[in-house]
Image (cartoon, rainbow, N blue to C red):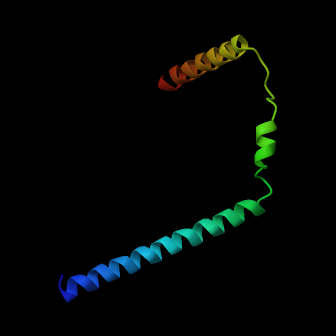
Amino acid sequence: MTIAELNVAIDGYNNRIADEFARMRYVAWWAASMTRAKKIPRLEQLMEAKKKDDKPIEVKREEHQELIEKLLKARENDAR
């Protein structure tokens, strides 16, 4: 390995270390900001969350079908 190749290898290594450090610093700031955010619930709350919509699957399917029909009618009206 020549001196120039060694310098390139060392520069690449230093750049990789700097990139890893910048990535860790970014993740640390991001994690700190997420812990301060009031909108994000704790994991325990998410796991214990109850479903708000306890409709039977048949009712949900009917509602979905109605929405699809409305969408198709709206597309037909827009196409004219």
Residue 67 located left or right of residue 20: right
Q: Residue furthest left?
A: 2
Q: Residue at x 65, y 69 (%)?
A: 29
Position in image of residue 4 (x %, y %): 21, 86
Question: In the rendered image, which quarter is residue 37 located in?
Answer: bottom right
Position in image of residue 23 (x %, y %): 52, 69
Q: Residue at x 70, y 17 (%)?
A: 60
Camera-nearest residue between 72 and 44: 44
Above or below for 49 versus 74: below
Camera-nearest residue between 62 and 54: 54
Q: Residue furthest front?
A: 1
Position in image of residue 7 (x %, y %): 27, 86
Above or below for 6 versus 80: below
Position in image of residue 52 (x %, y %): 81, 29
Quadrant housing the N terminus: bottom left
Question: In the rendered image, which quarter is residue 74 located in?
Answer: top right
Q: How many marks?
A: 0
Above or below for 41 versus 48: below
